[in-house]
Image (spheres, helix red, strand yellow):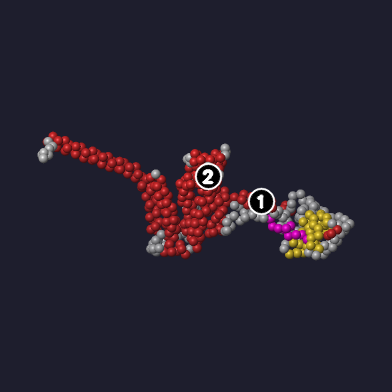
């Protein structure tokens, strides 16, 4: 066997030199990495200081403060959290916050998706997107003031009730005499159900007087003229329905005076044996005429003559105040959802959609089976963002909900403000609400962070 060849001295020196070069290179790399980390830390330090001062420290102090009583001197442990479970206002706020989390983000995202898909197919889509997105330029406070007026109960001021009352009155006409009633010693008596009837049967050829009071002169129907006594007509029943009231006093009771107004449009029915045998409407001067069928009948003024005018919906009442405020929120944030979803929709391969249409899929199938699944990541981003935003909603509820129903519209952020800074301020209880709100938001944030990391690995 041949003896192994040993490296010479020159070879050993070369090996040692190579090892030293590698070590020097590794040292330089470590030094360069250390310098890079120091530079990165120097740039991050101001942000970390601000993050600690504005986020970490307030969170830590809130947790600490929630363990003490109102004065902050007596340690109560979890007593404030137990008090939250017993407090009815806080339980209502939790329930309303759950309603917000379920309804508001889903509704805004769904509307944004519909708007984004539909505006792709019209030439004026850009203008429509601008209009829908414009509310995002309005602050929550300004939006609250706007919708406080929109939901005003008076139809002459509130847009929502003006539209609602207009639609209602199209199918059920409001009465022009909602407060009319018989006066003293009137020939009319109540007939039940809000109607009035003459005391005695009427006769053909003898004019009938139907005096009423209670309607403001400026509330009478347009076209009303001064009342006139009806003339007798053989074989017919005639009469006058009028406002038996003279401005400034004077006038005769149960008699037509020249300064008094007729009840234009008043409906009069002739009733015999419980059946309506004839009917008429008063003219502009209050006079009316019926056929001979009304002879011997009693004249009845139906209740629909006096039906109160429809005042609309109590949008800001206890039952509807939360959905009404959610509507204002959706008005603001549907544009945000539309823009983000529209950006995602622009990235959807058109060949995929066209291939589905060529294969025979209709537009609904293309939307449900292709567009929505492809947009799923964008929809999740929008939904999670809105959920986090909804958790801390405060301005809209505080401004829109009247003081009498704020307990019914209460949410956690508003309850936090009212508890910590209200009349009977309790910093300990308010801090406990802040911690609960943080605990509710953290899981949503963690889901969002995990989703971002998964997308970053793709």
Quadrant placement of the C terminus: top left
**Is residue 335 visible to us here?**
no
- Magenta highlight on residue 308: yes
**Residue 39 has which mark?**
none
Q: Secondary structure at mark 2?
A: helix
Quadrant of residue 308 in the image? bottom right
- Magenta highlight on residue 49: no
Badge 2 crowding class, 10 Å Cα cut-off, few under 14, some 14 to 19, many 20 or more, is some
453 is higher (above) or lower (below) than 234: above
The residue under the point 84% across, 57% down is: 291
The answer to whether residue 232 is left or right of residue 137 is: right
Q: Mark 1 and mark 2 in contact (Cβ < 8 Å)?
A: no
| Position of residue 327 measured from the top left corner of the image (x, y, whole percent) | 55, 51
Q: Secondary structure at mark 1?
A: helix
Q: Which residue is mark 2?
A: 366
Looking at the image, which residue sits at the far top?
10
The answer to whether residue 212 is left or right of residue 130 is: right
The residue under the point 54% across, 44% down is: 361
Quadrant placement of the N terminus: top left
| Position of residue 347 measured from the top left corner of the image (x, y, whole percent) | 47, 40
The answer to whether residue 108 is left or right of residue 314 is: left
Lower sequence index among marks 2 and 1: 1
| Position of residue 96 measured from the top left corner of the image (x, y, whole percent) | 51, 57
Q: Which residue is mark 1?
A: 167
| Position of residue 146 measured from the top left corner of the image (x, y, whole percent) | 57, 48
Q: Nearer the viewer, residue 68 or 447?
A: 447
The residue under the point 27% across, 39% down is: 32
Report the Cα–Cα distance between label 2 and label 1.
Answer: 36 Å
Q: Nearer the viewer, residue 421 or 455?
A: 455
Question: In this picture, which residue range is highlighted in magenta?
Answer: 299-309
**Is residue 443 visible to us here?**
yes
**Front disc: 2 or 1:** 2
């Amino acid at each position: 066997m041949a003896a192994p060849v040993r490296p010479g001295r020159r070879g050993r020196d070369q090996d040692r030199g190579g090892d030293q070069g590698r070590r020097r290179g590794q040292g330089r790399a470590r030094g360069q990495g250390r310098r890079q980390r120091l530079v990165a830390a120097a740039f991050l330090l101001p942000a970390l200081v601000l993050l600690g001062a504005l986020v970490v420290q307030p969170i830590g102090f809130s947790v600490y403060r929630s363990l003490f009583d109102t004065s902050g001197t007596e340690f109560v442990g979890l007593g404030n959290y137990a008090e939250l479970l017993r407090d009815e206002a806080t339980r209502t706020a939790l329930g309303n916050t759950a309603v917000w989390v379920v309804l508001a983000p889903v509704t805004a995202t769904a509307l944004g998706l519909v708007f984004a898909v539909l505006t792709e197919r019209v030439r004026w889509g850009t203008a429509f997107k601008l209009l829908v997105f414009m509310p995002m330029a309005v602050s929550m406070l300004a939006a609250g003031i706007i919708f406080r007026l929109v939901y005003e109960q008076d139809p002459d001021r509130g847009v929502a009730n003006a539209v609602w009352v207009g639609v209602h009155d199209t199918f059920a006409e409001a009465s022009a005499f909602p407060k009319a009633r018989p006066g003293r010693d009137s020939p009319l008596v109540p007939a039940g159900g809000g109607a009035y009837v003459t005391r005695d049967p009427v006769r053909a050829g003898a004019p009938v007087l139907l005096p009423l009071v209670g309607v403001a002169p400026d509330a009478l129907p347009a076209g009303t003229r001064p009342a006139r006594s009806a003339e007798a007509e053989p074989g017919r029943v005639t009469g006058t329905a009028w406002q038996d009231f003279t401005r400034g006093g004077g006038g005769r009771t149960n008699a037509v005076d020249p300064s008094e107004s007729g009840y234009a449009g008043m409906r009069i029915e002739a009733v015999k044996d419980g059946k309506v045998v004839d009917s008429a409407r008063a003219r502009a001067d209050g006079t009316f005429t019926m056929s001979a069928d009304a002879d011997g009948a009693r004249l009845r003024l139906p209740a629909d003559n006096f039906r109160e005018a429809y005042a609309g919906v109590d949008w800001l009442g206890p039952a509807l105040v939360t959905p009404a405020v959610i509507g204002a929120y959706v008005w603001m944030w549907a544009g945000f959802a539309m823009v983000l979803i529209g950006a995602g929709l622009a990235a959807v391969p058109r060949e995929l959609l066209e291939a589905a249409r060529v294969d025979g899929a209709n537009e609904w199938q293309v939307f449900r089976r292709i567009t929505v699944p492809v947009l799923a990541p964008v929809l999740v981003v929008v939904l999670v963002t809105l959920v986090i935003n909804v958790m801390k909603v405060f301005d809209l509820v505080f401004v829109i909900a009247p003081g009498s129903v704020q307990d019914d519209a209460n949410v956690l952020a508003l309850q936090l403000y009212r508890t910590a800074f209200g009349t009977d301020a309790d910093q300990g209880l308010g801090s406990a609400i802040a911690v609960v709100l943080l605990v509710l938001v953290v899981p949503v944030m963690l889901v969002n962070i995990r989703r971002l990391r998964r997308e970053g690995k793709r």
